[in-house]
Image (cartoon, coloured by chain):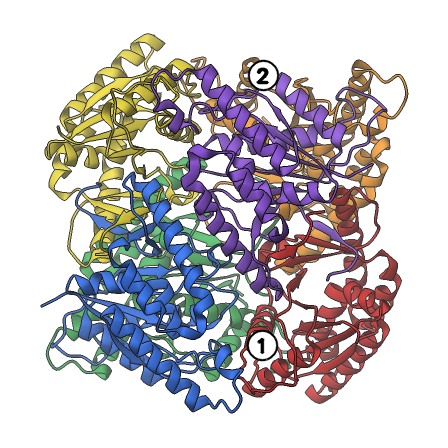
Chain colours: A red, B purple, C green, D blue, E yellow, F orange
Amino acid sequence: MSKAGLVITAHPGDFVWRAGGAIALHAKRGWRMKILCLSYGERGESQFAWKKEGATLEAVKADRKREAEAAAAVLGAEIEFMDAGDYPLVTTDAMMDRAIDLFRELNPAFVLTHSLNDPYNQDHPEATRFAQHARVIAQAMGHKPSSTYSYSAPPVFLFEPHQPEMCGFVPNVILNITEVWETKFKAFQCLPAQKHLWAYYERVALNRGMQGGRNSGKAMVHGEAYQRLFPMVLEELA
Amino acid sequence: MSKAGLVITAHPGDFVWRAGGAIALHAKRGWRMKILCLSYGERGESQFAWKKEGATLEAVKADRKREAEAAAAVLGAEIEFMDAGDYPLVTTDAMMDRAIDLFRELNPAFVLTHSLNDPYNQDHPEATRFAQHARVIAQAMGHKPSSTYSYSAPPVFLFEPHQPEMCGFVPNVILNITEVWETKFKAFQCLPAQKHLWAYYERVALNRGMQGGRNSGKAMVHGEAYQRLFPMVLEELA
Amino acid sequence: MSKAGLVITAHPGDFVWRAGGAIALHAKRGWRMKILCLSYGERGESQFAWKKEGATLEAVKADRKREAEAAAAVLGAEIEFMDAGDYPLVTTDAMMDRAIDLFRELNPAFVLTHSLNDPYNQDHPEATRFAQHARVIAQAMGHKPSSTYSYSAPPVFLFEPHQPEMCGFVPNVILNITEVWETKFKAFQCLPAQKHLWAYYERVALNRGMQGGRNSGKAMVHGEAYQRLFPMVLEELA
Amino acid sequence: MSKAGLVITAHPGDFVWRAGGAIALHAKRGWRMKILCLSYGERGESQFAWKKEGATLEAVKADRKREAEAAAAVLGAEIEFMDAGDYPLVTTDAMMDRAIDLFRELNPAFVLTHSLNDPYNQDHPEATRFAQHARVIAQAMGHKPSSTYSYSAPPVFLFEPHQPEMCGFVPNVILNITEVWETKFKAFQCLPAQKHLWAYYERVALNRGMQGGRNSGKAMVHGEAYQRLFPMVLEELA
Amino acid sequence: MSKAGLVITAHPGDFVWRAGGAIALHAKRGWRMKILCLSYGERGESQFAWKKEGATLEAVKADRKREAEAAAAVLGAEIEFMDAGDYPLVTTDAMMDRAIDLFRELNPAFVLTHSLNDPYNQDHPEATRFAQHARVIAQAMGHKPSSTYSYSAPPVFLFEPHQPEMCGFVPNVILNITEVWETKFKAFQCLPAQKHLWAYYERVALNRGMQGGRNSGKAMVHGEAYQRLFPMVLEELA
Amino acid sequence: MSKAGLVITAHPGDFVWRAGGAIALHAKRGWRMKILCLSYGERGESQFAWKKEGATLEAVKADRKREAEAAAAVLGAEIEFMDAGDYPLVTTDAMMDRAIDLFRELNPAFVLTHSLNDPYNQDHPEATRFAQHARVIAQAMGHKPSSTYSYSAPPVFLFEPHQPEMCGFVPNVILNITEVWETKFKAFQCLPAQKHLWAYYERVALNRGMQGGRNSGKAMVHGEAYQRLFPMVLEELA
């Protein structure tokens, strides 16, 4: 059975800009990659849509959903939506229940989510909180007791927020995404209304790539920065 | 050519209690392990010796040197001393020069040293400062220009101080040292005067081992905790 | 049209002791200053009132409201209450909705609120959380779509808590309130039951004033300390 | 009237492993020690129980309650349960109301609870939040006005989490529990299913004991580490 | 034999403003209080003196020395100077040697010194560094081996800097100095040229006093804030 | 008389990549901008030069000096070198003396220097330390007493290091350098051997520009990030 990775994001753009490389890279290697997208970003991440006359919440959601599905497809991932709303993102017990099931179904080798803080966007740390709770509750055997699953709480990697220093984000991992950069950039193009961010996140990828080269001594072009939360257990240091 | 690891410590006990597992583990796998021991711990880490009448500095140093050499041999490592003194440890330009040469000669895959702070023992962060400077200056091509070496600044792992929380030490790596625990414990026995610490650091190893098991989901018995300083570059997240 | 400033506080005393100078100063210069006071401080900030026999919640609230209105009038500000209760302060969706409207109506040039943490008083960070959410959601075009407002999320200044170091409060702004000190002190006098705090906050103002003089090299007498949360964009550094 | 101490924990094991020494020590000296145990740890802290076929929530809860009562009795403390559930622990207004009453009834000289953060277990910081709110609201005279109680918010001591550095736990107090160690260890034995933790927490006690000896210059064997949250008022420094 | 306390300060004013209460309080109770004043503050803490025509370094030093001796006498303490210079303060091996001897001679129950950081005055953390090194080296039996002293490294209390939040100063102790306030204020008067600071530090004392009252629930008038560096070992929590 | 700004950097590239915009912007507005460049970056920042056969220290220094002078001229600034060496940068009392004089001669309205920490390059924080000491000592009237200068310690702005999060760099100021971007980029071209960094720092400028736009609500293209160290004294909040 193939390994799995889980990505939990507040809004559709997040998994594209911030984790698109990791998704494409592991998908390319045969992993089952699953995105749990908590909202459609319909109220606060769709300014372009609301500038058009006659915009309705349902139409905006449908459009954003289509785009997110297209981007997920380009990256090679499954995607599931929770429709938790945005600005603010509000999760329910049923959503938590589903997320816990998902952790157990996938038994992922890692989970990717937002930074712990983000003063610019409260939906982001709320998604992180939700992800961390589900990850831990999935360990509780007294929650839906059953002998049909195998689960070990996976390492958590926080992906890069828009303004890292303001979010207390300190990367301790740079993932080399050079070989899937073109795929990631194709996923950008599924979000045509945010074209101004394409170049922004291309620059982020190139600068993280150069930093990766400096830290490892091995050249690389594109990188994605992550903050791994829990200690890593190693059998050898290098 | 085999891979190399470098360990820079202030006093002899440090490499035994704090990094003995890593040294033994990599040595066992054929790595060249080298300890640079900046002092003999003759003034401040030899209370037992000074309680004996007639103790002299030279005799205490010679005794501690013998013990350290024995422990290094048990662990399978080379050891080099700098005789920088302790309480306080004071390094010279010549010592820095030698340390830089050593980084270039070994081109180690990692360097192990003390925590960044230690309010109980100023020699420890001084050793860290020394190690970090040497590691960086070794990169400067204008320092002793030559074409005969190959060097890439290695990742730095800080080993565990005596009271981690007081030193701002936050482990992000737990190394599984179960398979070399007996060797590490044998090295303890080369330091007979500090017998009270044998049990202390055995308990540390067992508790870090249990923590490692919890973090990885895979049982292990003995662990050593490290704080990796620089971002890690990965080709895959797990 | 005049510029506006918004002040969001948990209890009436807060805007007087902590932000009274900023309110009076900007009001004096023709700004529209608006205070959103989330509770009357009726349960936990009215110890004096409850010591009188026969005190009722409604009477205490009415008294505190009168005092707060008087203080706001002295400072030259409008005041609006939310009656969210105190100890604990509990906000509702309707309150959030009103706060968002207020941000859009005023389009303030700054918002003043509590510190991010306060282990002595959980109402304070709750007010901050509420203010920050409203400030961000007001940006979401999909929230009550309309073309009748103009809004840009304003800078946030946290005012000084009672025990700054315990709240992680690090001031990066000292506002010179010398010219409105008398007005601020008059507002103190609208809160007769807390007379012991008059002198306390006069001392705070004098000491912040002296610190301001040291930091700027220009003498001033009274100061108010603030922690500005987001980066400031400048066209010139000084 | 004897002095009182209050202990607020998320799960039964917590008060045994983390605060059992403090409880036994003060009980031995005639204090009234009260444990408020928010849940039975039935879902997430009872993995052993759920591995048995036919386990039911009620049976697991009853078993854990019995064990917790036995452990409290060994330690010499009263115990009260809230049945707030675990994984996640969810408190209600009624529970808060009871906790506030308890603070006023006991007027404790200290309250012991969990660390402020714990990324491994969200129930722990939730219990801390609950304890801190109740402690502060109990000060509000407008909450259930009455003249029959005497209350002064007590100092808060956070007890040691499982992986201190990951929880931002920095001990500033080491309590000498040598004289009650045997009692604490007897309490361990009331939790037979977690036998693997007996040795773990014995090692913690021994190592904290040695650290206590180093910090005070006076030998001690077993210690419990605490982080005191608020400044201490002293009449003399030593 | 009476207990002793040691105070290590960079400049004369420091022990008066920041620790005068602790000195007077313990002296009053029969302690031997000793001030080690590293410089006379002759270059950077004597602006008033240098504004007078014809000022010479020797004359300024002599004047500051006289004032410091007068203040120490008022407080009931011995004082010793090191003449290490100020702006910058530069210590020598001989000074360190003398400080180590002093730690051993006094075997103090506490040592008071500056905050760990102070971006306004580099002499202050330099004095702290010096004090901490001497305190630790005094433990090293290999330093001037002798059987004539008894020494245990004392707890370190950092006194309050001029702008606490900018120095990372977080008080965890408030000392009640009400009963010696008049003595402390008399010591202020030995420093006539800094009259503007008399009122500043009186306000600090009154506000720390009120904070002390809030934290302990017991009224007090004047307080001095301290940050205790190392864990405290307790036999009882309250 | 025009206002002045002072820039203190460890190596030539630093003032170009990190502060070139601020220098050009203020120079364009008629300020006297002065760069104090502590070393030529001859050993560690000239890898390209040492790859050429026959390179000598003097030749490398001369080349780097010429480049730095050209870049300073493009930016409109004066430049002064200290030849303190690099890897490691070692300053002398004479250099400190000259830097203090410079602070007094210029009485700058701001000083720009490196971040407080940089684990990749110890010369950087050493330059910051040097700058901060000189800035403070220049205040000491007892240092070279004289009545011919007027000096007030200026605000300190730390410029952006290569890997901000690893250096604890948290920007609180974004300077709009759009109007001088072409000048800054021309200065890049004076450093032909580091061509790979041109694009890197252009990306930094564009991304900081976009962040500046988000924080201010006003579009800008190129930005430079700074961390202002001391509180700002304001007469109005916005």
* Residue B84 in the figure: left or right of residue B199: right
Question: CA–CA distance between discs 2 and 1?
Answer: 59 Å
Q: Secondary structure at mark 2?
A: helix
**On residue F95, which mark appears?**
2
**On residue A134, which mark appears?**
1
- What percent of the width, then of the height, locates residue D67? 35, 78
Q: Secondary structure at mark 1?
A: helix
Residue occupying image coordinates x 41% and y 64%: D198
Which is nearer the eye, C154 or E12? Answer: E12
What is the chain letter for disc 2?
F
* Residue F125 in the figure: left or right of residue D220: right
Residue D111 vertical placement versus B86 (above, below): below
- What percent of the width, then of the height, locates residue D33? 22, 69
Which is nearer the eye, F142 or C216? Answer: F142
Marks 2 and 1: CB-CB under 8 Å?
no
Which is nearer the eye, B86 or B73? Answer: B73
- What percent of the width, then of the height, locates residue F39? 69, 22
Quarter holding the N terminus of chain F?
Answer: top right
Amino acid type for the residue under numbered disc 1: Ala
